[in-house]
Amino acid sequence: DTINYFIENIDDSNMSLKEKVLIKIENHKRLHKMIEFCTTKKCLHKYLVNYFNQEHNGKCMMCTNCSKKRIIK
């Protein structure tokens, strides 16, 4: 897909091959985290808070995922 294409085709002649590989790895990790966020059925607030190494019980009842659960019940 397009995003992977851009990640794989980093072209900066000022970087060494090792630096390019490390950047690609980090960018793939970030992409994976974004995909996880977009597809999770769990509390989005908890996901974001945990991403920044903070704690949250995971039941905000305000994000779209929690509010869907609230409506279903």
Image (tube, grey):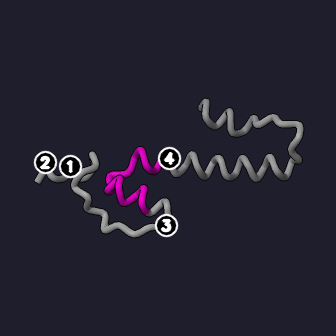
Q: Which of marks 1 and 4 is nearer the N terminus?
A: 4
Q: State the residue position of label 4.
A: 34
Tell me, yes or no, whether the two marked residues, 4 and 3, touch with CB atoms within 8 Å: no
Q: Callout 2 environment at 10 Å: few (<14), some (14 to 19), or many (20+)?
A: few
Rendering coords of residue 19 (x, y %):
82, 50
Residue depicted at x 32% and y 56%:
43
Q: Earlier in the sequence, mark 3 or mark 2?
A: 3
Q: Which residues fall within the magenta stretch?
A: 34-49
Q: 12 or 6: nearer the eye?
A: 12
Amino acid, disc 3: Asn
Of the residues tagged 4 and 3, which is closer to the observer? 3
Q: Which of marks 3 and 1 is nearer the N terminus?
A: 3
Mark 3 → mark 1, Cα distance in angstroms:
24 Å
Can you tell which mark lies on residue 31? none
Rendering coords of residue 52 (x, y %):
49, 61
Q: Earlier in the sequence, mark 4 or mark 3?
A: 4
Q: State the residue position of label 2.
A: 71
Amino acid, disc 1: Ser
Q: How many labels does the image show?
A: 4
Relative to 42, 38 lies left or right: right
Mark 2 → mark 4, Cα distance in angstroms:
26 Å
Mark 1 → mark 2, Cα distance in angstroms:
6 Å
The local secondary structure at tag 1 comes to helix
Tell me, yes or no, whether the two marked residues, 1 and 2, touch with CB atoms within 8 Å: yes
Q: Earlier in the sequence, mark 2 or mark 4?
A: 4
Q: State the residue position of label 3.
A: 53
Mark 4 → mark 3, Cα distance in angstroms:
16 Å
Q: State the residue position of label 1.
A: 67
Tell me if residue 18 is in the magenta stretch: no
Tell me, yes or no, whether the two marked residues, 3 and 2, touch with CB atoms within 8 Å: no
Of the residues tagged 3 and 1, which is closer to the observer? 3
Rendering coords of residue 2 (x, y %):
61, 30
